[in-house]
Amino acid sequence: MFDLVIIGAGPAGLTAAIYAGRARLKTLVLEKLSPGGQVMLTDSLENYPGFPGGITTKELIERLVQQVEDLDIEIELNQIERIEKANGFRLNSQDNKEYQAKAVIIATGAQPKKLDCVGEDKLRGRGVSYCAICDAPLYKNKEILVVGGGDKAVEEALYLKRFAKSVKLIHRRDKLRATAVLQERILNHKSIEIIWKSVIKQIQGKERVESIIIQDVETKLERKISIEGVFVSVGVAPNTEFLKEIINLDELGYILTDETMRTSCLGIFACGDCRKRPLQQVITACSDGAVAAVACCKYLEEN
Ligand SMILES: Cc1cc2nc3c(=O)[nH]c(=O)nc-3n(C[C@H](O)[C@H](O)[C@H](O)COP(=O)(O)OP(=O)(O)OC[C@H]3O[C@@H](n4cnc5c(N)ncnc54)[C@H](O)[C@@H]3O)c2cc1C
């Protein structure tokens, strides 16, 4: 029986483990792939406080893992598929292993949805980005394109215009899904071009993105556009599918919590990108992890 099992070893889960370890909770971290989470999709972080010039994601995660292991907390590789209430909680893994814990912190994060077009994987991090806030300064005076039609895509296009030489937005429909005020802002923006009713078929480039092939969804005609950056903003999916039965999620699947990271189920806490929150970044994931672990300690003391 563990005091606490943390599911997910991204920045949120690892930070929760550091705080839990320092509170001397008997803690286990379970991770389905390898520690690090989404940040491992990019090479460096330039906006993490305290590291002028940036820090590589590899170094930051290695340091976090070291800090967790120094507290004698194990990070075990396994994917949790089910949580049930049973004298605390029983967690079942993909390979039918069972774990028992008095409390659980969910830190399973999210993943950006991909376009699934030719060249996307090859050029990821080399002109293909999934995070405007993270990567915008790298595209100063460059010609870029944002894919999507929702709030996030429009916000990103408007934000990127502060850096880039030119911004195009490509959307598969003839109308944006974004809220009215954002639509007005982008439609009235003289220097952002919108390419309607089109999808990206291919992203091309030897070392970095050089061009894309787009297709008109009605005429099926294809054309090539020279571009230096593609920002994919077609949605993010929280890794919460397996939690539907036990805690409340919003309509997009994000976990609903209060400000101390408590979920709708007493004894289960959630932190980081898997929960509904206004900013999905490493710094806020770490902050969530710390708050969740402290709230969890309090819960264990009181129960
Ligand atoms: C390409 C890209 C670039 C980014 N750049 C920056 C940046 O420059 N600066 C910045 O601050 N933020 C950046 N972000 C955002 C940042 O990565 C996230 O906000 C942050 O990683 C969230 O941390 P997390 O721990 O909540 O979730 P995640 O990082 O998503 O970690 C969740 C972990 O849980 C594991 N997991 C999921 N389900 C299970 C399960 N069922 N069982 C066991 N384990 C599970 C996953 O494998 C993963 O390791 C970027 C994101 C992307 C995609």
Image (cartoon, grey):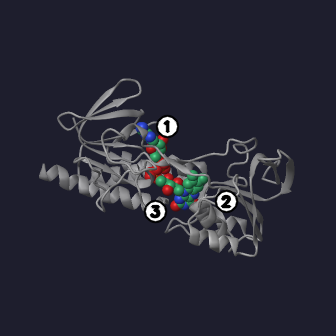
Q: Secondary structure at mark 1?
A: loop
- The residue that mark 1 highlights is 33
Residue 79 location, x and y as percent?
42, 33
Q: Quadrant of residue 52?
A: bottom right
Residue 249 location, x and y as percent?
37, 48
- The residue that mark 2 highlights is 175
Residue 1 location, x and y as percent?
21, 34
Residue at point 78% right, 59% down? Answer: 228
Please tell me which of labels 1 and 2 falls first in the chain: 1
Q: Amino acid at mark 1?
A: Leu
Distance between the Cα atoms at labels 2 and 3?
34 Å
Q: Amino acid at mark 3?
A: Ile
Residue at point 39% right, 48% down? Answer: 107
- The disc placed on residue 283 is 3
Q: Amino acid at mark 2?
A: Lys
Residue 231 location, x and y as percent?
67, 57
Q: Quadrant of residue 153?
A: bottom right
